[in-house]
Amino acid sequence: AQSVTQLDSQVPVFEEAPVELRCNYSSSVSVYLFWYVQYPNQGLQLLLKYLSGSTLVKGINGFEAEFNKSQTSFHLRKPSVHISDTAEYFCAVNTRGSYIPTFGRGTSLIVHP
Amino acid sequence: SAVISQKPSRDICQRGTSLTIQCQVDSQVTMMFWYRQQPGQSLTLIATANQGSEATYESGFVIDKFPISRPNLTFSTLTVSNMSPEDSSIYLCSLGTGEGDTQYFGPGTRLTVL
């Protein structure tokens, strides 16, 4: 079985500062990796995903993530955050052959002016 | 991408009553999922609902408590039965079309049980 650990429950940051949200996973087989964002009172929407190929994945709203197989990590980064990036961010993993992802607990990104 | 709507968006219910949540998709999909999102917790899968077959429930969830209907390829309902305060949560429906595919989520139903 796979598992996902998001190491930070809350990350406060000032506007225009860089941010990294950490995600580690555990799986005995190959995986697909996802980051979803949930704005207040909304459902989750996809930020980016890694299926195969280049380990650096670029997503919407200037976010990117890097798949590191040796460290079993998929950290999310943005070089300069905006107030509008304040939201809950979820890392998720699918093992190959599965239709159903496992989600991490989420990281609340709080951007201060 | 699919557009998913849920009704109601929120509700406050009394202990012992039941609430049915509706999920409507703007396209035909085979697999739909129901999740529970408790405060400060991850998303927990309740069940997978495929049209034309019984829903498949995850460990810890049973049909008597969370009956699901899937009458066609664009609609599903989840009922939360005999509610208690512990059922207070956000309930999300979603769909996914295949291995490694993006999951699309509805806006959620925020349930409070008094």
Image (cartoon, grey):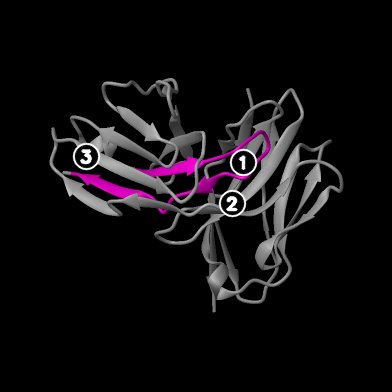
Point 49% across, 48% down: residue = B105
- The answer to whether B1 appears left or right of B87 in the picture is right
Identify the secondary structure beneath mark 3.
Answer: strand
Chain letter for mark 3: B
Identify the secondary structure beneath mark 2.
Answer: strand
Point 42% across, 22% down: residue = B57
Q: Residues within 10 Å of mark 2 (few under 14, many from 20)?
A: many
Any part of residue B99 in sight: yes
Marks 1 and 2: in contact by CB < 8 Å? yes
Which residue matches tag 3? Answer: B19
Magenta stretch in the rendered image: B90-113
Which residue matches tag 1? Answer: A92
* Callout 2 amino acid: Tyr
- The answer to whether A10 appears left or right of A47 in the picture is left
* Callout 1 amino acid: Ala
Image quadrant where residue A41 sits: bottom left
Identify the secondary structure beneath mark 1.
Answer: strand
Asked if the stretch drawn in magenta spans residue A71, the answer is: no
Which residue matches tag 2? Answer: A36
Spatial distance from mark 2 to mark 3, Cα to Cα?
A: 28 Å
Chain letter for mark 1: A
Asked if the stretch drawn in magenta spans residue B108, the answer is: yes
**Residue B32 pos. (x, y %):** 47, 36
